[in-house]
Amino acid sequence: MTMRLTLVHPAIGRRPGQSYIRSWQMESLPIAALAGLTPPDVEIAFYDDRMEPIDFDRPADLVAIPVETYTARRAYQIASEFRRRKVPVVMGGFHATLAPDEVARYAEAVVIGEAEGVWPQVIEDARSGRLKPRYRADAQPCLSEIRYDRRVFAGKRYLPIRLVETGRGCRFPCEFCAIQSFFDRTSRRRPIGALIEELKALKDGTKMFFFVDDNFAADIGSTGEFADAIAPLGIRWITQMSINAAHDEALLARLSRAGCAGVLIGFESLDEAVLRQMRKNFNRMKGGYGDALANLRRANIRVYGTFVFGYGETRPEAYLEAAEFAIDQGFYIAAFNHLTPFPGTPLYRRLEQEGRLLYDAWWLDPRYRYNDLPFRPDDGDAAAVREGCLAARRRFYGLRSIVKRFADPLNRGERVLARNFLPINWMHHAELSVRDGFPLGDPAWQGELLEVG
């Protein structure tokens, strides 16, 4: 009998009576990776909880759900619906690796770490009805083994941007980052030949690629080699990287020639003392932000800048200072978020030891809402941090700021990004109030969370 596997990408949540906010749906690369690892004789069904109802009654022999911290509550609701129908569930992903004991309460099996080394065994054990409670690879898998099967996305309305993973991990020790905890501060890149073949196969009809690496420029040498190798393809792409790479003008020139149109960079703070506390003093290396941004501008690379508030005692004016800085620098888009302690990170452990967490597990607590600060900051005023972040977003995504930044020749210099500048920025403007207070999980769900055992 053919084995039937159901893959589910859980949503963060939804307001009662409203559908999920659809604006930023991109293909789920973890789902494509699991599909690519699954033997061809297994029948696969895929549901994206962000955009479609899940058919819980469709026959299945195993359900697999990648879990992130923000989606954990909804993932457990979904798992309970399948498990109530006697269908076993396996969960993996960042949250399952960083909080395996919690996840194990709601799934028959938990994959800890990267799936490539253990997924074939999970499938084989599920076929024979002998799922183990936990699966953990003995070593990090070779990235040459990665295979993505994007056929599962057929018929779903995702943004017209293709996601490609060129490497994994980051070596920097940022206290708040779950990436360093998940990958144990290592960084690896996929073989260039395999990446070129993947890009060629996806190139037709793709206007923009997103290289989703945790830190695209984690290894400057291999990053430059990869850029040189893909330059003849004539593709356009965006990625995310640490700011230290922006001080290497030769590298930026190679990235630009290879089609790099924009980068996401974590500026985090304009305050040097805060950066030291975050373990991100490398952000201020050489000429600091000013020189790095000037280099990016000369290379014709746009910036998506992110800022984090809640470290130390935040000056009341720091929020709008960050927004004005981002406006003056002509950032394409920007994010102004509060510090979030993810389980398994050094930050979470420190706040837990200091007794400053406001919830036992904020991601599961029904009182927690999107934009809430889940811990007591140094100055004790969580509401001020929340309001400061909202004020910065309102300033950056205000009409005057959007018009000013659109007038920047850099933001109008790339056809695809120029055409989408106004829709993307206006969408952010419109969602300022929609996302505020957004619940995690589905508050309208009437079921009961089923625990294992």
Image: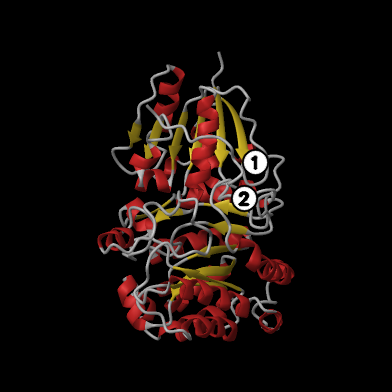
Helix, strand or loop for disc 1: helix
Q: Which amino acid does label 1 sit on?
A: Phe
Residue drawn 61% across and 62% down?
A: 435
Residue drawn 39% across and 35% down?
A: 105
In terms of sequence position, does the residue under pointer 1 or pointer 2 come before the other? 2
- Judging from the image, the colouring scheme is secondary structure
For the N terminus, give its image quadrant: top right
Q: Which of 149 and 363 is in front in this view?
A: 363
Residue picked out by circle 2:
14
Is 14 placed left or right of 83 in the picture? right
**Residue 278 placed where, x, y %?**
34, 71
Q: Which of 264 and 292 is in front in this view?
A: 264
Q: What residue type is labelled 2?
A: Arg
Residue picked out by circle 1:
153
Query: Where, by quadrant of the figure, is residue 433 drawn?
Result: bottom right
Q: Nearer the viewer, residue 78 or 263?
A: 78
Residue 42, above or below 423: above
Q: Which of 239 and 379 is in front in this view?
A: 379
**Residue 168 placed where, x, y %?**
42, 53
- Categorize mark 2 by other alpha carbons within 10 Å: few (<14), some (14-19), many (20+): many
Q: Is residue 251 visible?
A: no
The answer to whether mark 1 and mark 2 are in CB contact below 8 A is no
Query: Where, by quadrant of the figure, is residue 261 drawn?
Result: bottom right
Is 161 placed left or right of 190 in the picture? right
Indicate which label's residue lies in the foreground, 1 or 2: 2
Helix, strand or loop for disc 2: loop
Residue 399, above or below 26: below
For the C terminus, give its image quadrant: top left
